Amino acid sequence: MTEASVNRTKSALNALIDVEQLWIGSTPDYKLTSQELLVLKKRLERALENIQKIYDEFKPGMLAAEEEVKKAHAKRAH
């Protein structure tokens, strides 16, 4: 994992923690103010952007691993 990936992961997690805090702060009715909705939008966008970059970076390796596991399971089944 590259340093950029680690930083993106941390940023995405921090953004999701911020979202969780918004939800906790608005319980029990979950009605957010306009300002809170703007913060929510920004945090979710940041999380989505970083998660997409992480996914795109690791997709080839994840697909290869998936195929490898499928082949191993197929061998065991026969």
Image (cartoon, helix red, strand yellow):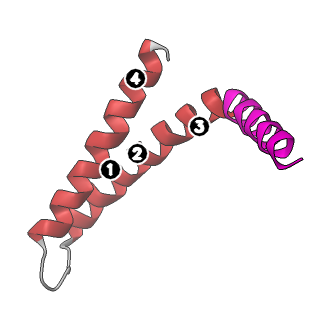
CA distance for labels 2 and 3: 12 Å
Residue position marked by numbered label 4 in the rendering: 6
Q: Is residue 36 above or below residue 49?
A: below
Residue 17 in the image, given as x and y percentages of width and height: 23, 50
Q: Main secondary structure of the magenta part?
A: helix
Tell which circle, 2 or 4, labels the residue nearer the N-terminal end: 4
- Mark in front: 2 vs 4: 4
- Which residue lies under the disc numbered 2? 47
In three-dimensional space, the C-alpha distance between marks 2 and 1, rounded to whole angstroms, equals 6 Å
- Above or below: residue 18 compared with residue 64: below
In the image, what residue occupies the spot 62% across and 29% down? Answer: 58
Residue 47 is drawn in which quadrant?
Answer: top left
Amino acid type at image mark 3: Tyr
* Boundaries of the magenta span: 60-78
Q: In this picture, is 45 found above or below 57?
A: below
Q: Are marks 2 and 1 in contact (CB under 8 Å)?
A: yes
Numbered disc 4: secondary structure? helix
Q: Does label 2 or label 3 sit earlier along the sequence? A: 2
Q: Disc number at residue 43? A: 1
Determine the CA span between mark 3 and mark 4.
Answer: 12 Å
Q: Are marks 3 and 4 in contact (CB under 8 Å)?
A: no
- Residue type (three-letter) at the residue carrying disc 1: Arg
Q: Which mark is residue 69?
A: none
The spot of residue 9 in percent (x, y) is 39, 32
Q: Going by the picture, which residue comes out furthest to the bottom?
A: 29
* Side (left or right) of 23 relative to 67: left
Quarter of the image where one finds residue 8: top left
Residue behind mark 3? 55
- Along the line of sight, the residue nearer the viewer: 39 or 18: 18
